[in-house]
Image (cartoon, grey):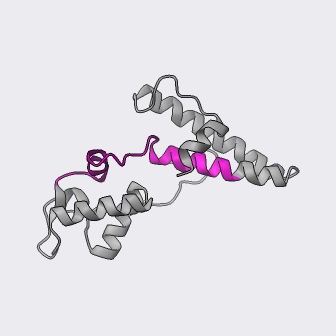
Amino acid sequence: MARLHSRKHGKSGSTRPARLEKPVWIERSAEEVEAEVVRLAKKGLSKSMIGIQLRDAYGVPLVKVVTGKKVSDILEGNELENPLPEDLTNLIKKALNLRTHLENNKRDLEAKKGLQRTESKIYRLVKYYKKKKVLAPDFKYDSERVRTLVAK
C-alpha cells in the first residue's frame, strides 16, 4: 500500500508463521505465556511490542497459537486495555513531540509541515475509528486533552 504523504510504497512487514497449531518445541504453557503478556503490559509495552518481545526473547511465534487468545483479548480480560488504539496513540505521541519542538523552534517550517501532516493522519484515523465504533462518537482530538491519555 502506498504512503499517504509521499510517493513511496513503504516498508515490507514480517511474515506470520505458516502453521496455526502449537509447535512442539515451545516449552511454555498457555498460562505462563498469558502471565508474561500481563507482566509486559504492566511494564508499559504496547501490544505489538509484547508480541515482538515474546517472539524474540521467549520463542513464542504467535500468542494466539499458544494460548488460544489474542494479546488484546488477554489484556481486556485483565483490564489493561489502552483507551486509544495503538496506531492512533503512536501518531498522537509523534504530534506531541513535534508540538514541544515547535515551542522551542518557532521558525522550523519543516517541523510545522510535519505536524500538519501528522495531525491530518490523526483526524482521518479518528473519523475511521468513530465509524467503526472503537472510539466514542463525541471524541475530539485536542492536543492538550489527549496529552493526559497518552502520558502513561
Q: Position of residue 33 (x, y in %)?
A: 23, 64
Q: Position of residue 85 (x, y in %)?
A: 45, 43
* Residue 64 in sight: yes
The stretch drawn in magenta includes residue 5: no
Residue occupying the far top of the picture: 138
Tell me which secondary structure the magenta stretch mostly adopts. Answer: helix
Q: Position of residue 123 (x, y in %)?
A: 59, 34
Q: Position of residue 90 (x, y in %)?
A: 54, 50
Position of residue 21 in the picture relative to residue 77 (left or right): left
Position of residue 80 in the picture relative to residue 66 (left or right): right
- Circle count: 0
Q: In the displayed structure, would residue 128 be above or below residue 41? A: above
**Near-viewer residue (34 or 18):** 34
Position of residue 121 in the picture relative to residue 73 (left or right): right
The stretch drawn in magenta includes residue 91: yes
At 52% across and 43% down in the image, what residue appears? 88
At 52% across and 29% down in the image, what residue appears? 127
At 60% across and 50% down in the image, what residue appears? 93
* Residue 2 in sight: no
Q: In the displayed structure, would residue 82 be above or below residue 28? A: above
Position of residue 14 in the picture relative to residue 144 (left or right): left
**Near-viewer residue (80 or 101):** 80
- Magenta residues, as a range? 68-97
**Near-viewer residue (81 or 123):** 81
Residue occupying the far right of the picture: 107
At 14% across and 67% down in the image, what residue appears? 29
